Each structure stands twice: as C-alpha cells, then as structure tokens.
Amino acid sequence: MKRILIVEDDVTFATMLKSWLCKKGFEASATSSVGRAKKAIETERPDIILSDLRLPDEDGTQLLKWNNENTLGIPFIIMTNYAEIQSAVQAMKLGACDYISKPVNPDELLKKIGEALETTHRPSHSEKTGKPRIHIKTSQKNSYLEGVSEVARQLYSYVSLVAPTNMSVLINGASGTGKEYVAKRIHELSPRKEKPFVAIDCGSIPKELAASEFFGHLKGSFTGALSDKVGAFEAANGGTIFLDEIGNLSYEVQIQLLRALQERKIRRVGSPKEIEVDIRLVSATNENLNKGIEKGTFREDLFHRINEFTLKMPTLKERKEDIMLFADFFLEQANEELNKEVVGFDTAATQLLQSYAWPGNLREMKNVIKRATLLAQNSLITPIELNILPEENFTLSEARMPLRNEAAEKEQIIVALQQASYNKSKAARLLGIDRKTLYNKLKLYNLE
C-alpha cells in the first residue's frame, strides 16, 4: 500500500483529502507545517508528498528543497490556488513532479498521483537524484507549452483522438494561437510521424506560383523556372502537409488543390507525367470559411474535403490559467537566447500580464516578454519593461503594494503614462485617481 503525506494547514480540507485517499486504497497521513512534515517524512518514509505552497512556518518549496538536498527522491506534488500558479511553476523547476490547482479535482489528483508514482523511482543514497519528470507537455525541441487550462486540455484530448486516424483536419483560430504547433503535434502522434511534415503559408504564395509551390515544375516550364523543382505534395509524400491560412487561396488554385486531394495524383508544371502521392492534410485558417462559401470565394466541395474534423484554437484570453505558465516559459526562452538571467515578474507585472487582453495571443506574448527580458535591469521584470496597456477596469494601484515613498509614486505615474501613450485621462484611470490629482502630481514631480 502506497503511503501519502499531506502537508496542509487547512485542517478541514486535509481531513477530507486524507479520508478520500484512504478510500482509494492509499495509506494517508496529514500534517500542517514544514517542520512537522520533515519529522513525518523521517519516521513514515512516505511514497509521495502532497504539499500546499503557503504553510504557517515556511513555504512549501522549502520542504521540496529539503527533500532534494537529503536525496530522498520522494515524488512531490504542489497544491496551489490560481493566483499562485507562477510559484507552482517555480516549484516544478526545483524538482516538483507536478502541481494541481485548488479546488482539487479528485479524478485529476488521482491521475497525477499515479503518474508521479509510475515515473519517479526512489533512488538509493549512493545515487545522485535528478529532477523528477515535469508533466507540463512541451515539444521535443522545447518550443511550445500546451498548458493546463480546461480549454487546453480539451483541445489536446481532441488532438490525441484524431491524430492516429487519416482524417483531414481543419484548425480554426485567431492569429498567434499556435495552429502550426497543433498541426505538428497531430503529425507526431500519427502513424506518419517518421515521414516528412511540410508546411506552406498559403497567404504568402502569389497566385501565379501556387501550382509550382504545391506540385513542383520542370526547368523552363515558365519564365523564372531555372531548374526542376519538387512541390510540397511530392516532398510530403507519405507524411503530412500543412496548409496554413488556406482561406487565402484563389478560386483557381482551390480547383487544382481539390483535384489533387480527390485523385491523390499531382502533375508538375510543364510535365505530362502524373505522380501518385499519399499525404495527410491538415489545414488552418483564421477566417470563417462558411462565409467564404456564401460569398462564392471558397469552394464548398473543397471545404468538406479539408474539414473531416475541426479543431477550435482558444485565444490566450480564454486560457487565464495558462497565462503565467506561458509567460514563464517564454522568459526561459528569452533568457537562453539573449544570455540573460531574469528570474521572473514582480507583482505589478504579473497582474498586468493577467489583465491584458492579448489580441495577438501567444505570438504577441512571446515578443513582449522577449523585449522585456532584453530591457530588464534587475532580476524581476516590471510593467515598465512590458509596456502593454491593461483592460480599462484594471488599475496599477491594485497591482502595486501601498506606496512607501515619493520615488515609488513617481515611478508608478511614469509607468501609467507610458502604458497610456501619454494620454493623461487614461493614465489617471490606470492609477485609480482623477485627472486633477494626476495633474497636481505631475507638477509636484516636475513631470510636465
């Protein structure tokens, strides 16, 4: 029977959790502080630890560090509320194998416990313990984070469902939401994963060159054809072809594309020879193709051919639980690329990241954080480096700690003016004061 230690100062919650885990076949005990937890670990030697972040005597991460320093190798799951997700991510960097948000979903917790016990072994004292497996999924090249929000989980459950099939998939979503990553993930999880993945941006192909891009050409078949060229369909043979922004294709090109998909054959421009191709098609668009059909700009028969299964990409604004995960993720990338060592975001910057609308989604966030990382002078990024404007109902005064001195107040006013593009009325709203008060402060600090 596996033993679980619960470290939680909410006695009612800890008792309920302990009772539930015992019913599920575990031997569970609970304690309410880091100090008591250390004694319990030494005497009980639990198989897994479930620990809250905020405890009466110390932070839960201190218990995690102690676990690592003593080479105990006990799998460690952090329990946290939504506002502390960034802290949970930092805990995972220190070696926690996973975290779960409160209120706890019992089925999700049971799954995470099972994964932690399965993937993390208890090393002997002679072994050096490495960091346990982190369950937030990234691609092999560490170029993308999938997230933990409900909409993200639903999306990737659909991806896992459709990927092993040969169905044509249409990914619908706003720019910057990560459509190409999803297309690659479908390919990676399919039986075609050992074959090529070829991506084409349909929005950047001139109408007169589309046939050449898709199907290739022979040397001399048209002006500028200086050599033979293999098209995307031939290059992707046996694998997956991804057509991004397919709604931008001209009507004539749509006809050629439909024929190739129906007949599974292509012909290079200038060649009489047909070439059989076996490809899996994944398309993406940020447009409403049904409206294109109504207007006569998009072929209905092509739409049905590419749309055997539809995936809807959520916007970043719809993924509140993922915002700080992605912020931290992009910060890591920026640190590596720019050779910086920025640790994270201060309280005001965190509030600002969470309140911002993110119209450009993940692409915009990546650019914003890369720029902020470059500009950062200290270990934490502040709103000054982010240089983004929050929602109208958000004020900087809500995000910052109470002002302690005039220098801090002056800095806050400068930040608000920068974010409001020096519109004083908007800056006053950000600060939570009226215009008259702002004008008086500007005069006081010689900021006119």
Image (cartoon, rainbow, N blue to C red):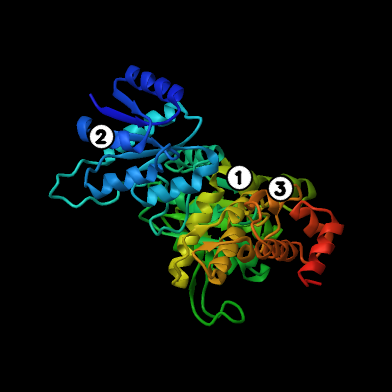
Q: Amino acid at mark 3?
A: Asn
> x and y percent of residue 268 in the render?
53, 67
> x and y percent of residue 319 in the render?
59, 44
Q: Nearer the viewer, mark 1 or mark 3?
A: 1
Residue occupying the point 62% across, 60% down = 364
Left or right: residue 98 versus residue 26 is: right
Residue occupying the point 40% across, 21% down = 15
Nearer-the-camera pick, 336 or 315? 336
Residue 186 visible within the image:
no
Q: Quadrant of the C terminus?
A: bottom right
Q: Residue 435's image quarter?
A: bottom right
Badge 3 vs badge 2, beta-carbon distance below 8 Å: no
Residue occupying the point 43% across, 67% down = 336
Give neighbour class at mark 1: few <14, some 14-19, many 20+ (Cα, 10 Å): some
Tell me how far mark 3 sits from mark 2, CA to CA: 60 Å
Say which residue label 1 marks.
314
Q: In the displayed structure, would residue 1 be above or below residue 437?
A: above
Say which residue label 2 marks.
39
Q: Quadrant of the N terminus?
A: top left
Q: Earlier in the sequence, mark 1 or mark 3?
A: 3
Say which residue label 3 marks.
288
Q: Residue furthest front?
A: 405
Q: Nearer the viewer, mark 2 or mark 1?
A: 2
Badge 2 vs badge 1, beta-carbon distance below 8 Å: no
Nearer-the-camera pick, 312 or 164? 312
Badge 1 vs badge 3, beta-carbon distance below 8 Å: no
Q: Residue furthest left?
A: 126
